[in-house]
Image (cartoon, rainbow, N blue to C red):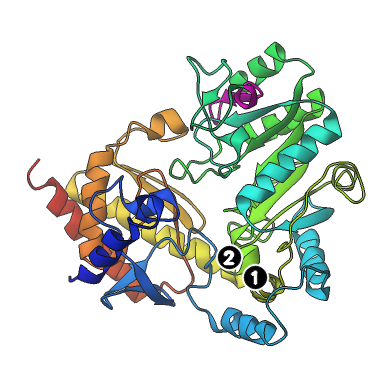
Amino acid sequence: MNISESKRLFAKAQDFIPGGVNSPVRAFRAVGGDPIFIKKASGAFIYDENDNAYIEMINSWGPMILGHNHPIIRESVIQAMESGTSFGAPTAREIEIAELIISVVPSVEKVRMVNSGTEATMSAIRVARGYTGKDKIIKMIGHYHGHGDSFLIAAGSGAMTMGQPDSPGVTAGTAKDTLLAPYNDLEAIEELVRLNKGEIAALILEPVPGNMGLAIPMPGYLEGLREICNREGIVLIFDEVMTGFRLAPGGAQELYGVTPDMTTLGKIIGGGMPVGAYGGRKEIMDFVSPSGPVYQAGTLSGNPIAMAAGLAMLKYLQSHPETYGQLLNIGRKVSEGIKKINLELGYDYTVNQVGSMYSLFFTDQPVTDFESAKQADTGLFGKYFQAMLQRGVYLAPSQFESLFLSTALTDELIDKILEAHRESMIEIHKNQ
């Protein structure tokens, strides 16, 4: 497979862009080799600058639920662009998409559009603090909520300690207000609440985390968080940037039957365009300016092109509820097929799957939180990634990222993915 043009572009990019990429995971540091530069995408395939085709398993990190360059999205964007690309003023589409989101997502009574998942989570935390008059937040170790200062916090000496800045530029003052707990551990949350009684504004988590690889909430865990937050007056925030409109029309909160106080959204509600949103109970959202005192603004918020793409996507999903059955079926075929091949070859690796999201962890132990995810063999994953890439299957270039499947994956393509998996597993283990 000739990838000479990608190599040339990456060498050139490093002269002008930090690390040669505009988001760190794209640099392939975790898997070795040089990144592939993409020229175009269609359906289940992406194509690099040398016109190599790859079956795509990331789908732009989630939003391409129907596959790439879907006609309904493309036509909606083209039509919207005929009227202009940005107004910095209200449009009818903003009302329409807000009404649609509110009608489907259980926790959302009012919603504010922004431009990214990071903007959505940063804003949600600010509103929760303004609403409660408290400063501290709880986040789960290994959960990613964008690159806001409050979220770039690493664990201290133990789960009960306050965090330390995880990046230069994040102040110790910011870090002291972020408390950390392991995912799927209600006792840790109870202890944090006891040690910080009356000081916690919000608890934010990915209900189904995908940024430490995919993990699954244990029975009773989300319900337990809801109970604690009700008792303590803490705003419960579900970060559904990845899971919203993917796992179910109403996201993970619909799938698991637990309603948070606030929800952050992104990815699918932009149909692939840059977008984010945060919403929640009316009394909380009415604290947002100009209704209330918590300030948040953005020239491109509710951008007409993004709104057109998002509306096209959400309307399609609304009129085709069978899409979620298709996605679940595809997710099961891929994940069960991988498990079966692994066992046939004598490898008992962990596969986690929810709907159209899944992760293969190179460990034989269950993966339920960040600590157990870190037991996976990342070196072996890097070899697997490269072996799959050589066979025309493009995976997330990190052991700690979920994969996102689309309805563009036919049975024939799934068979090709599974055959590539079998060959790759044999290849990476032959010298062990």
Confirm whether the magenta stretch covers residue 366: no
Task: State if disc 1 and disc 2 touch (CB < 8 Å).
Answer: yes
Check disc 1 and give the amino acid type: Pro
Report x, y in % for residue 74. 57, 82
How many angstroms separate mark 2 from mark 1 (CA)? 6 Å
Confirm whether the magenta stretch covers residue 185: yes
When the figure is inspected, residue 180 is found, relative to residue 309, above or below; the finding is above
Asked if one can make out residue 343 in the rendered structure from this viewpoint, the answer is no
Residue at figure coordinates x 47%, y 32% from the top left: 369
Residue at figure coordinates x 27%, y 70% from the top left: 416
Report x, y in % for residue 167. 49, 33
Check disc 2 and give the amino acid type: Tyr
Residue where numbered disc 1 is placed = 321
Q: Report the side of 311 relative to 424 (left or right).
A: right
**The N terminus - image quarter:** bottom left
Asked if one can make out residue 280 in the rendered structure from this viewpoint, the answer is yes
Can you tell which quarter of the image residue 89 is in? bottom right
**The C terminus - image quarter:** top left
Which residues are the magenta region? 173-186
When the figure is inspected, residue 131 is found, relative to residue 191, above or below; the finding is below
Can you tell which quarter of the image residue 20 is in? bottom left
* Disc marking residue 85: none
Task: Please rate how many residues cluster around mark 1, counting C-alpha atoms within 10 Å: few if below 14, some from 14 to 19, many from 20.
Answer: few
Foreground: 153 or 402? 153
Task: Please rate how many residues cluster around mark 2, counting C-alpha atoms within 10 Å: few if below 14, some from 14 to 19, many from 20.
Answer: many
Q: Report the side of 268 relative to 420 (left or right).
A: right
Residue where numbered disc 2 is placed = 324
